[in-house]
Amino acid sequence: MITLRGLTKRFGPTTAVDDLTLDIGPGQVTGFLGPNGAGKSTTMRMVLGLDRPTAGRALVDGRPYRELRHPLYQVGALLDATGIHPARSGRAHLTATARSNGVPARRVDEVLDLVGLDGRAVAKPGRALSLGMAQRLGIAAALLGDPPVLLLDEPVNGLDPDGVRWIRRFTRDLADEGRTVLLSSHLMSEMQQTADRVVVLGRGRLIADAPLAELIAAGPATAVRVRAPEPAALTALHDRLAAEGATVTTDGDALTVTGSSAARIGDLAYEVGVRVHELSPVAASLEEAFLELTADSVEYAAGRTGGGSR
Ligand SMILES: Nc1ncnc2c1ncn2[C@@H]1O[C@H](COP(=O)(O)OP(=O)(O)OP(=O)(O)O)[C@@H](O)[C@H]1O
């Protein structure tokens, strides 16, 4: 369990994290989202005792990180997979981390097995590791103490589709084993497939904290796409739908309709005599919900005048 109470971090004039109160519980993957500069990494760093809060508390199992007696057994983290020493082998990196934390050497082989790295891969020096291998090695290090709490900052960054799928399954398994998994990512489609619950930050503040399905359902309404072989005929359908209060946008040979159902649109098309070649729901997505939630919080929004970071 991760507990944040009034957690605040200021860097000079910048408030990176602003009065964050939140519980991140076990048995699920909690997605940690927010535009660039929203304060996700700073929050994770405070949980891990790497940044000191300006105010408030960040606790792991009820204690600040610095007071944990066996930190590696209580919380594991992947913050920056590129932080491995360039000349040291992956195995030496893990062995040294294990030794300095009182973890038995045999655990190194166990975690390598868990993340699917073979002996040849971890014999290479850090500089020769691909990003995918470095990410796996970072996760292996996080798992050395078999901790119940895991923080993974952008673990799928730069991974190929196989690596992305592996992380998705792996985080799912870790949560299913009852662990607390906090996972940040900018890839919304990935998060939509992985997270059970989503926490959204904007400018350091908590914007949303809800089960994934709830957040998506609260986002922009599901639309229906209508495509016709004779675009000119769509005008009649457009007008009928608008008269019923639906919101309709036209895009070439297609309409996008919100505020009406596919069944109703099909019936109206039949009534006005429009041949339809496609009538498909456009699934609501986390990305749309996220964009709507954070519209006022992005550091550099396209099309905004005056520049700057507001
Ligand atoms: N050491 C630091 N000194 C000064 N400002 C910092 C420092 N670390 C972070 N910040 C600032 O705090 C804010 C939050 O940054 P943070 O890296 O936590 O955001 P983030 O949500 O992780 O962003 P991203 O998605 O881009 O990684 C930003 O405005 C950032 O510039």
Image (tube, helix red, strand yellow):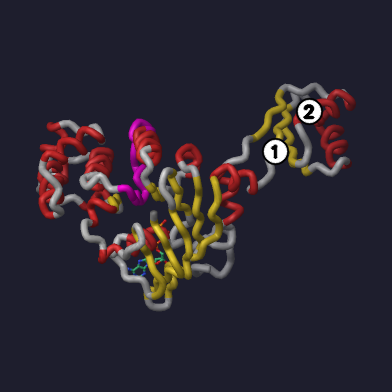
Ligand 1 picture quarter: bottom left
**Can you tell me whether the CB of the residue at mark 2 lies under 8 Å from the nearest atom of ligand 1?**
no
Q: Secondary structure at mark 1?
A: strand
- 135 to the left or right of 14: left
**Magenta stretch in the rendered image:** 148-165
Q: Which picture quadrant has residue 66?
A: bottom left
Foreground residue among 78 and 181: 181
Q: Which residue is painted at 31% across and 65% down in the image?
A: 64
Q: Which residue is painted at 84% across and 26% down in the image?
A: 267
Quarter in which the N terminus is drawn? bottom left
- 12 to the left or right of 128: right
Q: Is 67 above or below relative to 239?
A: below
**Can you tell me whether the CB of the residue at mark 1 lies under 8 Å from the nearest atom of ligand 1?**
no
Foreground residue among 218 and 120: 218
Asked whether residue 303 is in view, the answer is yes
Residue under pointer 1: 223
Q: Which residue is painted at 49% across and 43% down in the image?
A: 196
Find residue 300 and report its horizontal and vertical position in percent: 50, 61
What amino acid type should be assigned to the residue bearing mark 2?
Ala
Asked whether residue 164 is in view, the answer is no
- Please give the label number shown on residue 263: 2
Find residue 168 and report its horizontal and vertical position in percent: 39, 37
Q: Which picture quadrant has residue 271?
A: top right
Few, some or many residues within 10 Å of mark 1 (<14, 14–19, 20+): many
Nearer the observer: mark 1 or 2; the answer is: 2
Find residue 259 and report its horizontal and vertical position in percent: 77, 41
Q: Secondary structure at mark 2?
A: helix
Q: Are marks 1 and 2 in contact (CB under 8 Å)?
A: no
Few, some or many residues within 10 Å of mark 2 (<14, 14–19, 20+): few
Q: Is residue 6 magenta?
A: no
